[in-house]
Amino acid sequence: MVETIYGCKWSLTVYQLLANGINRPGEMVRNVEGLSTKVLNECLRKNLEFGILQRIEYAEVPPRVEYQVTAFGDKFLRILEQLEELQQELAK
């Protein structure tokens, strides 16, 4: 799981966007140069499958979809942060 998520260069970008309050797919694509809708959807799908993110659908016209980090996702992201800190220590 960690390899799949960490190996996808866009997952970390998506987590950063969510942390900054950007939780709608169209808004994500507009805020990140080089990120396509197709790649974003694949990334979001993987994160949904692992239970890191949840999809919230609103019954509105036009339809609105938002993503947010789950409780499990919060724990997972803390672990990723610790891995990043370890990597930085090794680089010293």
Image (spheres, grey):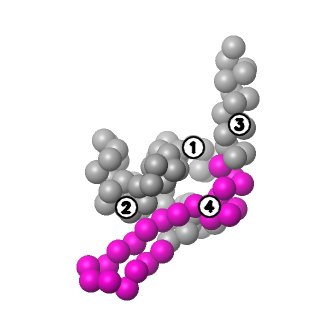
Tell me where residue 62 appears, x and y as whole percent. Answer: 26, 79
Distance (Cα) linking label 4 and label 3: 17 Å
Which one is nearer the viewer's eye here, 77 or 39? 77
Q: Can residue 32 be seen in this view?
A: yes
Q: Is residue 87 above or below residue 28?
A: above
Graded by Cα atoms within 10 Å as few (under 14), some (14 to 19) or many (20 or more), the crowding at tag 2 reads some
Which residue ends up furthest to the top in the rendered image?
A: 92
Q: Is mark 3 on a helix, strand or loop?
A: helix
Q: What residue type is labelled 2?
A: Pro
Q: Which numbered disc flags the more N-terminal residue, 3 or 1?
A: 1
Q: Which numbered disc flags the more N-terminal residue, 4 or 2?
A: 2
Q: Which amino acid does label 3 sit on?
A: Leu
Disc number for residue 7: 1
Q: What residue type is labelled 1?
A: Gly
Disc 4 + disc 2, Cβ < 8 Å: no
Distance (Cα) linking label 4 and label 1: 15 Å
State the residue position of label 4: 52
- Over which residues does the magenta segment extend? 56-77
Q: Which numbered disc flags the more N-terminal residue, 4 or 3?
A: 4
State the residue position of label 3: 83
